[in-house]
Image (cartoon, grey):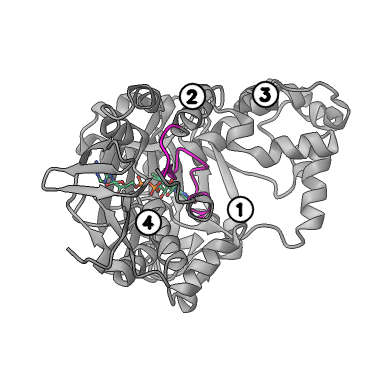
């Protein structure tokens, strides 16, 4: 045992939340040799859902394929990791997005007023857009996205536009996702401008060029790889934490299948269901609450194909499908048209997203059935008439936490319960937002706010 170490901080979980917490802790305590920081990760590789796989020239993302330029911390981290040269902005065509209805693709207008001529909205829905600025009603604090859009616009808008958007971001159900938790800025726009349309226009004016999507030339896995390289000495892989207990002296005992660790401070970044298992003995109530946070299953199939073998592969980001289509496929991303370096010349990489809360039955599908569903999709919608060169596959049974009505009720109760456990923190994608940007912001803030509470 190193006698000079007087405080031990443990980060549990090595996804982007955990790796970011480790990074910010190392920065905070860089001049404190008496503080030891260790990250424990269950798997043999770090990164959680984020990772980039390669076959020939094709790069397939197992989770996030990029991030928006709305969070300076993300760019700062990339710079601190020496990855600035690898930063790439999405092609301009990525702004073209489609909706798929009855196997036909409809380009979404670039600005809200363009929706007045969108063929999938009825005349009454279009009239609702013109009247939106005059809607005076206020939503409940736990109003869902479906309720919000129906109230401000019309149920047609909720069904045709909000529903697929929620599938695309949360793999979720717009009737369950709480607006204020999932899209706080939309709620703020309504509060500030009294109208969504006016608010969006004002935000557009203020933001100049608007939001852009970014990634790394070799994929999002580069961020994980760089974090791992930098902090390898502090990361212990293959450490399946199964129990955390609090000692009478205020320290925490962390048990893995191999070892027992003593921590003075803990940052818990694992998914809610895993956290629930670990905390059963320490705090049954928090454990029970965490257990109620729901996750959507998502399977991703990557098809590398020859471009010339498609009848209809338009330029753009990809498409989403409303749940009324009753398809297990939520949408398809045209990865090679979003970022450079994703497929060889004359080849394309399509990432087919299957599952979500509308399709829980996919949990019972085999890998072969999921790949077959993906292939059927690209034949029916994009007119693919060849054989893929390569197929990538990734299934997450608990992919994305749901910012739903359950979570809305539970989160404050968990936060209240945590007050009983000094020096114990949660920062994870079910806590302060699911996006990579949110995970970094949350890790940064949680580390900055953490104080040593002496027992
Ligand atoms: C398919 C998909 C597409 C996405 N696309 C985007 C996107 O385009 N843009 C965007 O911003 N975000 C996207 N996201 C969301 C974002 O990538 C995730 O929310 C984020 O990466 C989650 O990071 P995390 O560290 O909180 O959780 P995870 O990545 O789930 O990491 C948790 C870690 O904890 C470990 N762990 C679990 N149990 C234990 C245990 N008992 N002991 C020790 N360790 C344990 C796990 O092995 C894992 O490494 C996407 C997510 C998915 C699934």
Q: Going by the picture, which residue comes out furthest to the right? A: 134
In the image, 141: left or right of 440? right
Sequence-wise first label, 1 or 4: 1
Q: Distance between the residues labelled 1 and 4?
A: 22 Å
Q: Quickly name the residue at label 1.
A: 96
Residue at the spot 59% in from the left edge and 28% down from the top edge:
178
Q: Does the residue labelled 2 lie within 8 Å of ligand 1?
A: no
Which region of the structure is painted magenta?
Answer: 420-440
Sequence-wise first label, 2 or 3: 3
Q: Where does residue 344 sit, x and y in percent of width and height? A: 36, 70
Dot 4: what SS? helix
Q: Where does residue 239 sit, x and y in percent of width and height? A: 18, 49
Q: Quickly name the residue at label 3.
A: 141
Of tags 4 and 2, which is closer to the observer? 2
Residue at the spot 44% in from the left edge and 77% down from the top edge:
82
Q: Distance between the residues labelled 2 and 1?
A: 38 Å
Q: Quickly name the residue at label 4.
A: 309
Q: Of helix, strand and loop, which mostly describes the magenta segment?
A: loop
Task: Name the disc covering residue 410, or none.
Answer: 2
Q: In which quarter of the image is residue 275?
A: top left
The reply to whether residue 385 is in sight is: no
Whether pointer 2 and pointer 3 mark residues with C-beta atoms closer than 8 Å, the reply is no
In the image, 21: left or right of 317? left
Of tags 1 and 4, which is closer to the observer? 1
Crowdedness near tag 4: few (<14), some (14–19) or many (≥20) residues, C-alpha within 10 Å: some
């Amino acid at each position: 045992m190193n006698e000079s170490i007087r405080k031990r901080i443990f980060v549990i979980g090595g996804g982007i939340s955990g790796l970011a917490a480790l990074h910010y802790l190392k920065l905070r305590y860089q001049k404190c040799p008496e503080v030891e920081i260790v990250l424990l990760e269950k798997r043999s590789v770090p990164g959680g859902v984020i990772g980039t796989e390669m076959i020939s020239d094709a790069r397939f993302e197992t989770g996030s394929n990029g991030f928006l330029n709305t969070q300076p911390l993300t760019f700062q981290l990339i710079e601190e990791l020496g990855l600035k040269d690898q930063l790439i902005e999405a092609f301009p065509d990525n702004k073209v997005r489609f909706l798929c209805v009855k196997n036909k693709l409809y380009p979404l207008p670039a600005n809200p007023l363009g929706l007045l001529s969108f063929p999938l909205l009825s005349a009454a829905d279009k009239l609702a857009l013109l009247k939106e600025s005059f809607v005076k009603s206020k939503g409940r604090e736990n109003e869902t996205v479906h309720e919000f859009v129906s109230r401000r616009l019309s149920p047609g808008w909720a069904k045709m536009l909000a529903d697929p958007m929620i599938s695309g971001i949360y793999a979720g159900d717009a009737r369950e996702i709480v607006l204020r938790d999932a899209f706080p800025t939309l709620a703020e726009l309504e509060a500030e401008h009294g109208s969504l349309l006016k608010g969006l226009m004002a935000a557009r004016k203020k933001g100049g060029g608007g939001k852009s999507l970014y990634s790394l030339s070799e994929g999002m896995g580069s961020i994980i790889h760089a974090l791992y390289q930098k902090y390898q000495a502090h990361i212990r892989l293959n450490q399946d934490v199964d129990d955390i207990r609090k000692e009478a002296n205020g320290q925490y005992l962390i048990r893995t299948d191999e070892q027992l660790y003593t921590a003075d401070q803990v940052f818990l970044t694992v998914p809610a269901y895993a956290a629930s298992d670990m905390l059963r003995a320490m705090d049954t109530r928090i454990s029970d609450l965490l257990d109620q946070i729901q996750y959507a299953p998502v399977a991703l199939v990557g098809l590398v194909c020859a471009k010339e073998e498609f009848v209809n592969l338009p330029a753009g980001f990809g498409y989403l499908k409303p749940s009324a289509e009753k398809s297990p496929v939520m949408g398809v991303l045209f990865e090679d048209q979003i970022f450079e370096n994703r497929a060889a010349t004359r080849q394309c990489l399509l990432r087919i997203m299957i599952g979500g809360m509308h399709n829980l039955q996919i949990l019972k599908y085999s890998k072969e059935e999921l790949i077959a569903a993906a292939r059927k999709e690209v034949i029916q919608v994009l007119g693919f008439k060849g054989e893929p060169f390569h197929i990538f596959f990734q299934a997450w049974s608990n992919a994305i936490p749901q910012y739903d009505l359950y979570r809305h009720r539970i989160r404050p109760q968990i936060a209240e319960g945590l007050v009983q456990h000094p020096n114990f923190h949660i920062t994870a994608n079910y806590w302060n937002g699911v996006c990579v940007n949110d995970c970094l912001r949350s890790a940064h803030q949680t580390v900055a706010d953490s104080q040593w509470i002496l027992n």
